[in-house]
């Protein structure tokens, strides 16, 4: 599913008006109907609602919601702002007049100057409907609105934001003043979640999010290009292919997994199991000699290729050609391992997958970034990403940096997190929808390395292998959470549910 920017949604809305031969006011009625239905379905008429409406079209939505709630027996308190210092938008004027005709002037509080506003007393039993500013906001809030937002945030009331929390931008919030953004408990957004909603640092503003379908023109939705996509089950179902009944293990590809070291052989085991569960034909694990008994006991289905060193990886031989090579889980950053990684990257010419300690080795020799084979894949978590590309304070900053370096080095970057984001060199970003907090457990990323590598080995396109692998890994985690809960999950539970996850999406 596409994730549209504010500008893209605006163009789609304009096209909808044109094709349906309707006015903007009709679309506002459609939006307000969806919002008011959601409010009415959650609270009774006895609940105290306080609706704050700004001077633009977001305020028009809020006023239309107030009118519809009145018609259903609710009696919200309504505040319309900035009617003197800033002219109301045409739609806001229209909805003000419609509301006046319905409930009369005495039931609306008109606020001419926000700075002199004496706000109503709010407490934990109240519901505040935030219709101050929507996706048209281009500058951080200032003046009296900042005091109003901070008052609402400190009131303890349950806050419902229409479309987007006031003060927040739909995509990028670098430079915004986070103190002056509404902290919504529930955001009722239109058509799709905004990109900003997927960043961890914005969770406190968005709260629970529900998408309301405005029935925008389907042709425009389909044809409008965007760089952002949300990957869901149907997307994966369309790409996954059933197996040929005459297939053999060589048809499913060969994988060389360079992983493990003394005391960290579990990472190699998890990655190899992940690869085999995801369908790889032959998996060979290159590891220090100390890992022989561990690997052959824990996962006899995998082949073992011993390093010359007993405890760490010190030499990566390229004697055979594999469908894919993946490197990093549990390798450590010993000096000999660092030299081995350096030699591999300088001499290997085909795309590969680099994770965990392979990335930590590169971070110690940043010049290696330019030698990573084109179209390779790296899968850092936040700390590993910052080691490679400098300190970042937010997910948004990391995504912006990832877009730049993905294009610069011609590599795909998997930014692991609650909404794992896959960044391609063409600046397309795929946001994952599966997964849960229980997957924040040691070894989870090692399993992902195996899953993605297995899909590449099976000749899925490399770009799609990453997206598919991330989704299937998250879905396996969701299935594991149903059995063990998010507190009780461990990485091997994800491995154990990979087969079920793949079967589920192929139904």
Image (cartoon, rainbow, N blue to C red):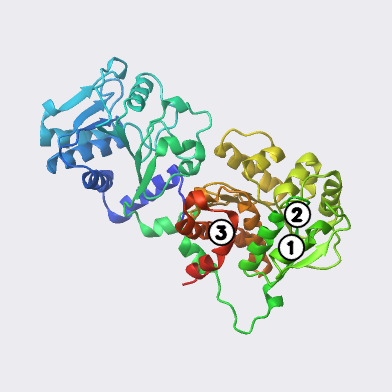
Q: Is residue 359 visible?
A: yes
Label 3, label 1: how far apart the Cα atoms are: 18 Å
Please state if 39 lies on the left or on the right of 269 as rendered: left
Mark 2 element type = loop
Specify which label sits upstream in the sequence, 2 or 3: 2
In this figure, which residue is indicated by the disc labeled 3?
Answer: 493
- Estimate the spatial distance between the alpha carbons at disc 2 and disc 3, rounded to whole Å: 20 Å
Other-residue count near label 1 (Cα within 10 Å), few / some / many at <14 / 14–19 / ≥20: many
Answer with the quarter of the image where residue 148 lies: top left
Mark 1 element type: helix
Up-down relation of residue 269 to residue 28 (above or below)? below
Marks 2 and 1 close (CB-CB < 8 Å): yes
Left or right placement of residue 119 versus residue 398 in this view: left
Determine whether label 3 and label 1 are within 8 Å by CB. Answer: no
In front: 264, or 453? 264
Q: Residue at x 35, y 41 (%)?
A: 187
Residue placed under numbered mark 2 in the picture: 260
Residue at the spot of label 1: 295
> Do callouts 2 and 3 mark residues in contact (Cβ within 8 Å)?
no
Which secondary structure, mark 3?
helix
């Amino acid at each position: 599913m596409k994730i549209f920017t504010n500008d893209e949604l605006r163009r789609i809305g304009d096209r909808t008006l044109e094709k349906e031969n309707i006015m903007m006011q009709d679309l506002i009625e459609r939006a307000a109907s969806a919002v008011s239905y959601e409010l009415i379905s959650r609270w009774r008429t006895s609940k105290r609602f306080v609706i704050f409406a700004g001077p633009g079209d977001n305020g028009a939505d809020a006023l239309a919601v107030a009118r519809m709630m009145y018609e259903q027996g609710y009696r919200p308190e309504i505040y319309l702002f900035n009617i003197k210092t800033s002219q109301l938008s045409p739609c806001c004027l229209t909805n003000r007049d419609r509301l006046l005709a319905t409930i009369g002037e005495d039931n609306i509080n008109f606020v001419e100057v926000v700075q002199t506003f004496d706000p109503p007393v709010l407490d934990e039993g109240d519901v505040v409907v935030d219709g101050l500013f929507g996706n048209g906001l281009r500058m951080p809030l200032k003046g009296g609105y900042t005091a109003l937002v901070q008052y609402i945030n400190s009131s303890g009331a349950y806050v419902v934001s229409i479309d987007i929390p006031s003060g927040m931008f739909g995509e990028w919030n670098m430079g915004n003043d986070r103190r002056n953004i509404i902290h919504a408990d529930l955001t009722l957004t239109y058509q799709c979640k905004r990109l900003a909603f997927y960043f961890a640092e914005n969770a406190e503003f968005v709260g629970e999010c529900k998408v309301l379908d405005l029935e925008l023109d389907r042709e425009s939705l389909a044809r409008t290009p965007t760089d952002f996509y949300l990957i869901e089950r149907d997307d994966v179902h369309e790409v996954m292919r059933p197996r040929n009944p005459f297939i053999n293990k060589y048809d499913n590809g060969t994988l060389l997994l360079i992983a493990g070291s003394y005391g960290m052989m579990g990472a190699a085991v998890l990655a190899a199991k992940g690869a085999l569960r995801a369908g790889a034909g032959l998996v060979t694990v290159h590891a220090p000699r100390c890992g022989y008994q561990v690997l052959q006991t824990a996962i006899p289905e995998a082949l073992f290729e011993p390093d010359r060193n007993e405890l760490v990886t010190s030499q990566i031989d390229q004697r055979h050609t594999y469908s894919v090579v993946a490197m990093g889980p549990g390798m450590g950053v010993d000096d000999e391992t660092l030299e081995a990684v350096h030699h591999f990257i300088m001499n290997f010419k085909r795309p590969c997958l680099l994770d965990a300690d392979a990335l930590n080795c590169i971070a110690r020799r940043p010049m290696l970034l330019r030698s990573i084979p084109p179209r390779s894949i790296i899968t850092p978590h936040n700390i590993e990403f910052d080691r490679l590309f400098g300190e970042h304070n937010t997910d948004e900053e990391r995504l912006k940096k990832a877009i730049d370096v993905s294009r610069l080095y011609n590599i795909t970057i998997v930014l692991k997190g609650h909404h794992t984001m896959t960044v391609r060199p063409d600046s397309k970003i795929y946001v994952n929808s599966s997964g849960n907090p229980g997957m924040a457990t040691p070894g989870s990323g090692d399993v992902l390395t195996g899953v993605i590598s297995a899909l590449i080995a099976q000749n899925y396109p490399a770009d799609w292998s990453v997206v598919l692998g991330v989704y299937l890994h998250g879905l396996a985690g969701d299935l594991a959470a149903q059995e063990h809960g998010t507190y009780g999950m461990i990485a091997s539970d994800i491995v154990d549910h990979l087969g079920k996850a793949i079967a589920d999406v192929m139904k």
